Amino acid sequence: MLLLMPNTLKLQLHYFFDDENIHSMNAFIRNDNEKELLLIFKEVLSSFDIDVEIESEALAEGGLKSIWKFIGKNGRQLTLIVTVCGWILTRIPVENKELTSLQIENLKLDNELKRAELRKLKSEAADKDSIADEVVEKVLNILDRDYKILWHKSNFYKRNSYYKKIDKISTTELNEKNEPINKERNVSRSDFSKFILRSNELPSLTDEEAIIELISPVLKKGNFPWKGFYKGEIISFHMRDEVFKNSILNREVEFTNGFGIKCVLQQTRKIDDTGLIKVTQNNVITVLETITSDAVEPTKQAEKYYRDKKLIQNQLTFGFHNKK
């Protein structure tokens, strides 16, 4: 069981170097490391919806040690926060995941469920005299699925993997007198690669009922982007439905003010350097309906799209039933 701590706790990050007489490191690397760590701490605090102040203390030697002081109103919750922050940095992933395998398609719902579960665990920690290891494990299992934490942790270890002086990294929780209250947790250089994500690309996001009000369709041949309103925002997109594109070019479909389409919109995405998801390209795969102030008309290609979709669903259902 973890001991109950006062309202100030500290987390120490210890860099071990390949030469024990070295007590300094590249300032840019250290500052970039601290940026990634503070972003991880920020995401943890945001997930718990808890008010904790973090202060940075003077560096200590012995390799090189960075110390952060966590100050909060509830000692039990603070113990949980600091313990989790220390574990996150040194807990080796079960597998070296690519971002494309992360389950973030229902990101808003996932975040709501995550925060609800963490608030429950936070309250559980606040009501008990000590924090059980299984509570910490439950929290870590939830935060292990947080793509922002995974991304910033990956950046941290990627940067340090290039810095050859570092032989090992460890974290330790300290009391107000800088005395360890838990065992030091170490990550050797040979394990740095296990934390590093290999791609910043995400699965494409598909909206099969996207409504886009056209601003400027392209009225000449070529791979030029169109513009339209989608979910209250102006987007640029490529029209991949050649049948619909030709109907516009041949004036078979009349473009008027307020003209819109219901379509299958595919969005390619990636995570930027700050850990935010960015849409890199919008593609209209199939136009299903045209929308004017007078009428909504299905397109010919819509019939084929729904027929093909039903066929695929039937094949999947048939395949499932035959796996008995």
Image: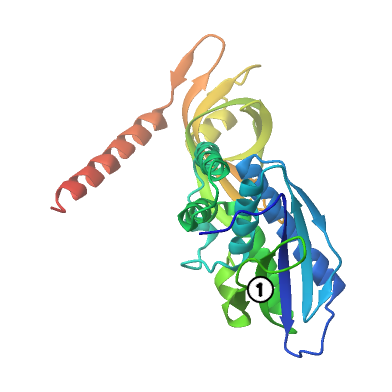
Residue 200 visible in the picture: no
Image coordinates for residue 24, horizontal then vertical, percent = 85, 80
Residue 190 lies, with reference to residue 252, above or below; the image says: below
Image coordinates for residue 208, horizontal then vertical, percent = 45, 34
Mark 1 Cα within 10 Å, few/some/many (few <14, many 20+)?
some
Residue visible at 41% across and 32% down in the picture: 301
Image coordinates for residue 104, horizontal then vertical, percent = 51, 47
Q: Residue furthest top?
A: 294
Compared across the picture, whether 51 is left or right of 3 comes to: right
Residue visible at 61% across and 58% down in the picture: 83
Q: Nearer the viewer, residue 95 or 115?
A: 115
| Residue located beneath label 1 in the image | 170
Q: Secondary structure at mark 1?
A: strand
Q: Nearer the viewer, residue 198 or 165?
A: 165
Residue visible at 49% across and 52% down in the picture: 135
Badge 1 amino acid: Ser
Q: Nearer the viewer, residue 181 or 191?
A: 181
Image coordinates for residue 172, horizontal then vertical, percent = 66, 68
Compared across the picture, whether 7 is left or right of 194 comes to: right
